[in-house]
């Protein structure tokens, strides 16, 4: 009998079909969002799960699903998974790093530029039919990206890729802050200078957040951090909801503490704080940082490869390509 696995959300059918060569697959082609209770019910008897950021995999769920051996998350971030609880039960967790780095960096840069140059605000104005006079000297004037100071909070692979775009493509001075300073060769490759968080907040013209969510990074940007930024600065969050205090951000935008924000992620998404929706100087996208066809396919493919290998099948049996807690693999 083949082991049973669960695919929690709709995905590329041709990629998921590879799972059927090895496993008895239950999937969710209608893409229904299951409640925690429904998720536990669907996981009964399953040895592996291909999960996404929309499912919370915590200790209570693991206790209710004792057959589970592998949690293969689609996404580089895995804050939806309690890795400590998985490791304690010898359940392998995998993620999908690297394949999304450049695509997500492209998106972060685009969102920062749209925010600085007020692109969506201007588009809404034109679509509403309000563009009745050309050549108004101060209409939708924004701030320059080229030559400005780019600040990056969280200097992992995506942060470094954004830094390269800023320095090499737009002549920006790049400063960053991270839990630990990068080794000199990565710093040189990123053309970025390490600074403390206060300096980052004070000096950045455009601050981009690319750090992982954890209890330590919860509200890393709140009212007091926003107050330290330049009045003309922009803030772009492509990391995770909860890193920014969205209510404090809306208040700071309303009072002109900073100029504008670009947000791809939100506290409690898919809900968006109503105060943000009311403001013109907020560019909003629905968590699409990695959403190119090629990258989303590569993420699904990597998750499938991880699941097949984690359960001991395929060419990499027992050696999944991107484990988060590889200590589980050791005897
Ligand atoms: C995914 C992401 O779309 O990789 C991540 O961490 O946030 C996105 O690329 C999301 O995780 C879907 O599961």
Image (cartoon, rainbow, N blue to C red):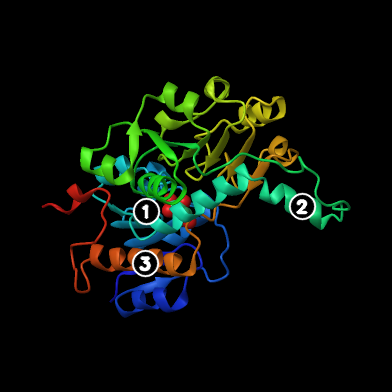
Residue extending farthest to the left is 331
- The one of 302 and 176 positioned closer to us in this rendering: 176
Q: Which mark is residue 65?
A: 1
Image quarter where the N terminus lies is: bottom left
Callout 1 environment at 10 Å: few (<14), some (14 to 19), or many (20+)?
some
The first of marks 2 and 3 along the sequence is: 3
Per the model, the C-alpha gap separating discs 1 and 2 is 48 Å
Q: Is residue 317 left or right of residue 25?
A: left
Callout 2 environment at 10 Å: few (<14), some (14 to 19), or many (20+)?
few
Q: Which mark is residue 235?
A: none
310 is higher (above) or lower (below) than 223:
below
Instruction: Name the secondary structure under disc 3.
Output: strand
Question: How far from the left and from the top, in percent, is residue 62?
Answer: 36, 48
Callout 3 environment at 10 Å: few (<14), some (14 to 19), or many (20+)?
many
Instruction: Name the secondary structure under disc 1.
Output: loop
Question: How far from the left and from the top, in percent, is residue 11?
Answer: 48, 69
Question: How far from the left and from the top, in percent, is residue 307?
Answer: 30, 64
Quarter residue 299 falls in: bottom left
Which residue bears the numbered disc 2? 124
The first of marks 1 and 3 along the sequence is: 3
- The one of 53 and 181 positioned closer to us in this rendering: 181
Which residue bears the numbered disc 3? 5
Per the model, the C-alpha gap separating discs 2 and 3 is 45 Å
């Amino acid at each position: 009998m083949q082991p049973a696995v669960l695919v929690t959300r709709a995905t590329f059918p041709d990629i998921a079909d590879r799972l059927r060569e090895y496993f008895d697959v239950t999937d969710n082609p209608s893409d229904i969002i299951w409640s925690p209770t429904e998720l536990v019910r669907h996981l009964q008897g399953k040895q592996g799960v291909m999960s996404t950021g929309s499912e919370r995999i915590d200790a209570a769920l693991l206790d209710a699903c004792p057959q589970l051996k592998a949690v293969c998350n689609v996404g580089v971030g895995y804050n939806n998974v309690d890795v400590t609880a998985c490791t304690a039960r010898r359940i392998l967790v995998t993620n999908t790093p690297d394949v999304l780095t450049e695509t997500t960096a492209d998106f972060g840069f685009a969102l920062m530029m749209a925010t600085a140059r007020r692109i969506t605000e201007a588009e809404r104005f034109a679509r509403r039919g309000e563009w009745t006079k050309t050549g108004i000297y101060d209409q939708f004037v924004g701030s320059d990206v080229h030559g400005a100071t780019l600040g990056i909070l969280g200097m992992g692979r995506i942060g470094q890729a954004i830094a390269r775009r800023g320095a090499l493509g737009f002549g920006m001075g790049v400063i960053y802050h991270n839990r630990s300073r990068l080794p000199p060769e990565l710093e040189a490759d990123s053309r970025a200078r390490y600074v403390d968080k206060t300096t980052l907040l004070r000096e950045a013209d455009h601050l981009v957040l690319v750090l992982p969510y954890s209890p330590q990074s919860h509200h890393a940007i709140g009212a007091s951090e926003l107050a330290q930024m330049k009045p003309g600065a922009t803030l772009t969050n492509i990391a995770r909801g909860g890193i920014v205090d969205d209510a404090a951000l809306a208040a700071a935008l309303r009072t002109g503490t900073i100029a504008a924000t670009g947000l791809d992620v939100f506290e409690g998404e898919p809900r968006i704080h109503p105060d943000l929706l009311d403001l013109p100087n907020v560019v909003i996208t629905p968590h699409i940082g990695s959403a190119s066809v090629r990258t989303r396919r590569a993420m699904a493919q990597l998750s499938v490869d991880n699941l097949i290998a984690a359960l001991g099948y395929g060419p990499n049996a027992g050696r999944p390509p991107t484990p988060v807690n590889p200590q589980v693999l050791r005897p």
